[in-house]
Amino acid sequence: MKNLFKACAMALVLSGCASGVQIVDTTNDTADSVMGLEYRDFEKAAGEAVQSMIASGSVSKPGGGRYILAIGRMINDTMQRIDTDQLVKKIRIELLNSGKVMVTTAVAFNGPEDEMSYTARELRGNSEFDQSGIAAKGQLQAPDLSLTGKILQRNHAMGRNKTQVEYFFQLSLTEIKSGLAIWEGETPIVKRGSAKSVSW
């Protein structure tokens, strides 16, 4: 009897966990938005930034070829615990697919994204490894451009239990050689809803 009760309880738990779950078609999602940042907001901000960069010509290298981009400091100035890479990764993918930019993972604001570029070079002179397959000195490519940015959030009470939440995706593209910003963009996303809705 005890085992039967446990089996029934387990069946109820499993069926309860699975009920009401659906896979969201992210390419055709018509569900209402939320007050906090969601995937559609990051897609919008990244898409607009890349389109603006390409239209401005700032990522078109004179004479052809690709610029090398390093990722600089990205600041989250919102009330939410978000990973700024959710925005940066989308920008990187679109720029890579544009054929105009390559991203270095050997140089970044917080150190190399992929330390293997340096770790593999420590094998130089190690007789256990075929030295012909080890990267020689002077082969790492220095970045031409740096992408930095900030995500801001501002909340405003509107009366009648309504609130407005404003998000600003601010980005700057700097030419490293000169230190000049060759492109800057800002995508505002404004949401209004019940003051009871949370945005963090």
Image (spheres, grey):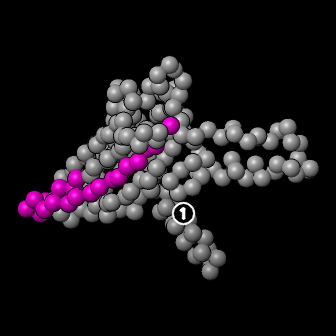
Q: Which residues are magenta?
A: 144-166
Residue 105 in picture, x, y percent from top left: 59, 45
- Going 13% across and 62% down the picture, which residue do you hit? 157
49 drawn magenta: no
Left/right placement of residue 82 relative to residue 7 reads left
Q: Residue furthest right?
A: 127
- Dot 1 alpha-carbon crowd within 10 angstroms: few under 14, some 14 to 19, many 20 or more: few
Q: Nearer the viewer, residue 188 or 133?
A: 133
Split into 4 quadrants, where in the image is the N terminus? bottom right
Which SS does the magenta portion mostly show?
strand
- Going 91% across and 50% down the picture, which residue do you hit? 128
Residue 158 in picture, x, y percent from top left: 10, 59
Residue 80 in picture, x, y percent from top left: 35, 62
Q: Nearer the viewer, residue 176 or 165?
A: 176
In the picture, residue 90 is in which quadrant? top left
Left/right placement of residue 54 relative to residue 139 reads left
Query: Residue flagged by tag 1: what amino acid is it?
Result: Leu
Residue 27 in picture, x, y percent from top left: 41, 36
Total marks placed: 1
Q: Nearer the viewer, residue 56 or 80?
A: 56
Say above or below: 8 vs 153.
Answer: below
Q: Residue furthest front?
A: 178
161 drawn magenta: yes
- The reply to whether residue 11 is in sight is yes
Q: Residue furthest bottom?
A: 2
In the picture, residue 75 is in which quadrant? bottom left
- Going 22% across and 58% down the picture, which residue do you hit? 154
Split into 4 quadrants, where in the image is the C terminus? bottom left
Q: Residue furthest top?
A: 63
Residue tagged by mark 1?
14
